[in-house]
Image (cartoon, helix red, strand yellow):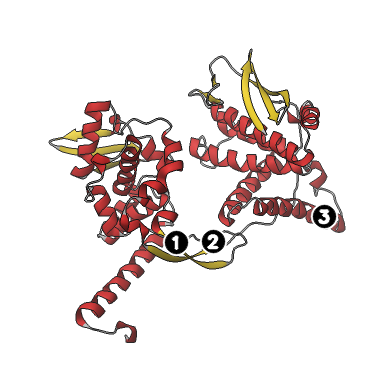
Amino acid sequence: MRITFYQRDNTIYSRVCHKTEMIRITTGIRVPKHVKFLPTRERFKGDTPDVPEMNADLDRQRAIISDLFAKHGSLEIVKKYYSQPMFHVQSDEPTFKFAQLCNKYIDGITNGAITTKAKTKFRISSIRTYQFATTTYWRFVAKNKDIDLRDYDLSGKELAQKREIADNMSKHFDKFVAYMIDNDFKINTRADVMTIIMVILAYWERDLFLTLPKPNRVAGYETPIITLPTDFAKALVLDSHKKYDKMSDEMKFLWEISATMLVTSFRISDALSLSKGDISFVNGEAFLIKDNLKTGTETTTPLPRALAERYAHNINHYGDVYTPVVSAMRIVRRSFKEFFAQYPEMHELVTYKRADIIGRKVAVTQKYYELVHPHMLRKTAVTMLIANGVSIDHVRFITGHKSDSINRYIGWVDKTYKTEVKQYYNKVYNEDTTKA
């Protein structure tokens, strides 16, 4: 089945094809004059806060269409269901249906009507996280029944009724968690989605003056800290392998992104948004001045010459810090592992423990390039900073860490480097440290 979106007048329609069958349906999404729909990408473009929500609406529509067809196997049934008002995302009608309330919550945090506990607007990165959770719930209710929150109000109920209502609420969300398991959502992803769903549920409980049961929480687990070998990280930034000049433009771009993250400890979103305006050259030295997209803090970081020279070359030749490519994030997703696979060190095996789909700890052995991902570079940068004596306060400032999660890195560095010292003693002084 193929789903495409297109604009006619000021409305977005969908064309759904399966084999020789084809239907056209309206999504109900209206396109404001200040927003542009890109037909080749099937996405909205614009700088206003409503654009992310409109793109999330497209994702929800695609999920609903896919799930309806998977459930019924008929485009005609999809068309019949889709013609009903319940599938029109844009609606100001009062509702107690939780899936629709999830949409209204996303509208609220996008346009600023709903703020954080600190009374500030939600950041774009946070809005995207909330959109992912609500889209997941929409996919679930497309296959299952949505709930009306009035049916779960405990106000004025007898004890036996309260217990029955609470059990029914738990069953609904337990089924939602089971749906995520069936769709291979990792345990921490499930925990994050359920946490957001409970935040939204609590908001509407207050706003609608209801008294609702609390769904069961999903416990997450601390992911293991796996980093690139320190010697390799240094060699990559210094291009000790002498590979950069022989790379294609896409591979050069990935080298530049990777080296940037290893030097700055940026998240991938911050690294991708880097521009020439963030680089300052003073007295032959280069400095990076950047706002952290997630925390909103500004960081100033001196840059090593190896990376600064690449930036300067690209700015002079291309007008920006990176080698120009088409669809930067797509390249990261598609070719990140391929980029690291070209280095011999990345074919070494590493064994670690992780949680399986239901949370059991299992030992896994993989090659470094098979498990590398952008955040692994940030972890590598943080541990290298700590291991080389940079104070924790400075590490927090550089990395934008606000939580106590950085303490995990301290423990990991301490444990890892003690182990390396013991191995050094054993090798150099023939000292059996296992008896110490």
Amino acid beneath label 3:
Lys
Q: Is 81 in front, or is 191?
A: 81
User: According to the image, label 3 marks what residue?
Assistant: 162
User: According to the image, label 2 marks what residue?
Assistant: 221
Pointer 3: residues within 10 angstroms few (<14), some, or many (20+)?
A: some
Q: In the rendered image, which quarter is residue 233 located in? A: bottom left
Q: Locate residue 261, reporting x and y percent.
A: 34, 46
**239 up-or-down from 224: above or below:** above
Mark closer to the chain start, 3 or 1: 3
Q: Is residue 222 left or right of residue 302?
A: right
Amino acid beneath label 1:
Gln
Q: Is 135 in front, or is 240?
A: 240
Q: Locate residue 159, reporting x and y percent.
A: 84, 58
The residue sitting at 86% across, 58% down in the picture is 160
Helix, strand or loop at mark 1:
strand
Pointer 2: residues within 10 angstroms few (<14), some, or many (20+)?
A: few
User: According to the image, label 1 marks what residue?
Assistant: 366
Residue extending furthest left? 283
Q: Are marks 3 and 2 in contact (CB under 8 Å)?
A: no
